[in-house]
Amino acid sequence: MNQLAQKDMGNQSVTLIDAEERFHAMESKIRKMEVLLTDIQSHSHPGVMDLMLQYSMLRTALSRIGSRLKGDAIAKIHIRDLKMLGKLEILVFEFEGTLSDAHAELA
Amino acid sequence: MTDDYANRSWLGDNSTASPGSSATKSSWQERAREGLNKTVEFLAEHGVAVGIAGGSVLMAMGATATAMTVTADTMIEASIAREAAASLLTAGVLKLAAFSGAEYAAKLHLKGVEYLFDDEAYREAAYGTDGEPIYDDPRSSNPIRSMSDEAVLAEPVFQSAIRSIFKDLEHDPETRHQIYAMIQNNPGAREALMNAQQQIDQQATNDQKPGLVDDIDYSDLDLPDDSPS
């Protein structure tokens, strides 16, 4: 399931059918990234705070969206929300790559 | 955990940092900045749908705008820490996300923000009842944590920090233009900026020190007709 979600990242539009699954894939990425951030957070490289800020924003956004995808709430999801999820997915995906490179250099 | 913090001098202690490595620009740094920019634009456009208050979006804009002024050859302690208002907004964004490294990084890299994290609502969100930091278990299916906008924005210094940053943007027309374009997309953020302005004007009047507060020039910001005067 994770491999499928990985393949779809940023390639296909989020649909009503896979919205929840793709949201959870993003959530899972954010959890994993916390560990990478912890490794580099003491570094005084000026890019570190950019990464911390972006991580905070993505994390806060995902945390808020989570409550909107639970149970009955998902029935109220609008096409706009799916587009929004698609954009967020690209941001999470790109951030993962950037963080991974930063981690390789600094950790 | 608190003992660990107490054993270190967070202000000006660079012992764990590795100086010198920022002399050459890292390949990922440009992408990090680009990503940060795109993310704050995302928040401006979709903040309402996501469920993030305008004040928090404004805080994120201010933090991003000041982060952009940090260049490759400045240590973050020397640059971000220079501006008290920038430190506060940056710490505010980290605090809102309530993750294990938020307090650590803010106290290490930013100055004068310690007290922001001495807050019951933050403790509750970022630490368990045993006072140990909560690290998200990648296998867990618990929802990701964050704090409520109200709890973070209630800190009165944010109003003046936000205003101070936006006042400062007058010296940086390019960033100012970019931020104002985003504010147009987010009525809540626009309102939060107006509120910050109003509260500080009011305070200045009460203090009988009007000379301390300069007005922000809003002439290029298309304000709604029903905005409070």
Image: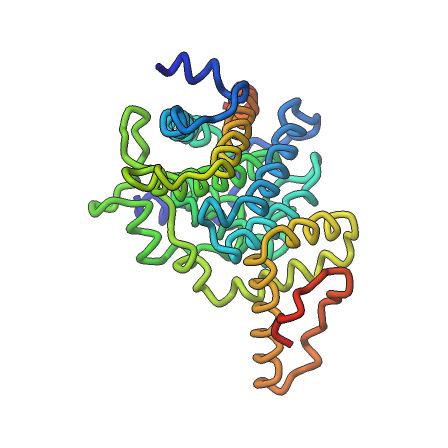
Residue drawn at 37 percent across, 46 percent down: B5
On screen, A24 above or below B152? Answer: above
- Which colour style is shown? rainbow
| Residue at 52% from the left image edge and 36% from the top image edge | A84
* Most foreground residue, B53 or A78: A78
Residue B7 x, y percent position in the rendering: 36, 46
Q: How many marks?
A: 0
Q: Position of residue B145 (x, y in %)?
A: 35, 42
Residue B125 is left or right of residue B183, and the answer is left
Percent x, y for residue B201?
62, 77
* Residue visible at 56% across and 74% down in the picture: B199
Task: Looking at the picture, tell me which residue is in the foreground, B185 or B163.
Answer: B185
Relative to residue B212, is residue B48 drawn left or right?
left
Q: Between residue B89 and residue B174, name the one nearer to us.
A: B174
Nearer to the camera, A35 or A3: A3
- Image coords of residue B177 (percent x, y): 75, 51
In this view, the residue farthest toward the left is: B130
- Residue B189 visible, this angle: yes
Q: In which quadrant is the N terminus of chain A drawn? A: top left
Q: Residue at x 54, y 51 (%)?
A: B57
